[in-house]
């Protein structure tokens, strides 16, 4: 019996788990449930998601793990993807907490307001402008951090990079952020895209 991943194909939070699974060459069964569909409504009704959202990783014994970054840490445990040095590991986790507490709530939210019809009424010019300004501030912070290093934490790629890659790599195309301002981020994105086993957001397992 293999791992089972409940994921939303269009979601960056779900994508980050699919990406790490691909990079680690870990076999799994993918169950895709897209936003605003009857299938996802039924899954909610069946209490498939412990915390009410995806992604959820179901282990071989039936245990279901929620929260994308927690899943990344579970998958990376005892591997080179999770730094073993306590300080570097804390730095990686710090960036992952920041990703959910700051980055995702701006970068992903602006993209969602522009993409999903059910959120169009929230996409006021004022709200979009606010998110754009704040997003550029957050991306500038990332860019500054990456100007003298290749990876977010330590001297090699880690779960922190996978966590932040998911919504950053579509920030321009989906969120309308001006990524030309952030050359260090662009180079970092290219390093991740060049990794063996890399998969795109729309590379959905059969």
Image (cartoon, helix red, strand yellow):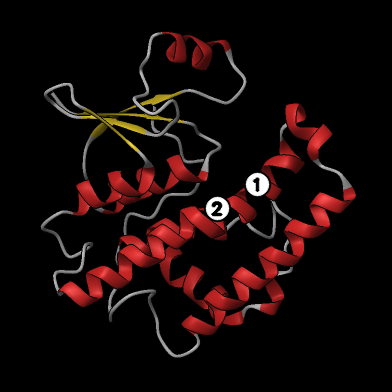
Question: Under tag 2, what secondary structure?
Answer: helix
Dividing the picture into quarters, in which one does residue 17 lie?
top left
Residue wearing tag 2? 104
Name the residue furthest right.
125
Q: x, y percentage for residue 12? A: 51, 45
Residue in front for this viewpoint, 95 or 187: 95
Q: Is residue 96 visible?
A: yes
Q: Is residue 11 above or below residue 153?
A: above
Q: Is residue 86 left or right of residue 68?
A: left
Badge 1 density bin: few <14, some 14–19, many ≥20, Cα 10 Å: some
Q: Is residue 151 left or right of residue 169?
A: left
User: Residue drawn 65% across and 46% down?
Assistant: 109
User: Residue drawn 61% across and 49% down?
Assistant: 108
| Proximity of marks 2 and 1: CB atoms separated by less than 8 Å | yes
User: Residue drawn 29% across and 49% down?
Assistant: 72
Residue wearing tag 1? 109
Q: Is residue 92 left or right of residue 148?
A: left
Q: Is residue 65 left or right of residue 47?
A: left
Q: Is residue 195 visible?
A: no
Q: x, y percentage for residue 182? A: 63, 78
Badge 2 density bin: few <14, some 14–19, many ≥20, Cα 10 Å: many
């Amino acid at each position: 019996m293999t791992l089972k991943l409940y994921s939303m194909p269009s979601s960056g939070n779900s994508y980050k788990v699919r990406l790490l699974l691909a990079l680690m060459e870990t076999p799994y069964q993918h169950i895709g449930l897209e936003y605003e569909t009857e299938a996802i409504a039924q899954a909610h009704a069946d209490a498939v998601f412990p915390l009410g959202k995806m992604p959820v990783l179901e282990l071989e014994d039936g245990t279901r793990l929620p929260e994308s970054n927690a899943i990344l840490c579970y998958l990376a445990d005892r591997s080179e993807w999770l730094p073993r040095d306590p300080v570097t590991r804390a730095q990686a986790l710090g960036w992952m907490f920041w990703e959910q507490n700051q980055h995702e709530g701006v970068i992903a939210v602006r993209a969602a307001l522009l993409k999903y019809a059910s959120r169009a009424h929230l996409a006021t010019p004022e709200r979009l402008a606010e998110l754009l300004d704040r997003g550029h501030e957050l991306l500038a912070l990332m860019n500054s951090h990456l100007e003298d290093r290749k990876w977010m934490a330590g001297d090699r790629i880690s779960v922190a990079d996978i966590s932040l890659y998911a919504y950053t790599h579509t920030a321009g195309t989906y969120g309308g952020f001006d990524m030309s301002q952030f050359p260090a981020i662009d180079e970092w994105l290219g390093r991740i895209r060049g990794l063996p086993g890399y998969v795109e957001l729309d590379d959905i397992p059969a």
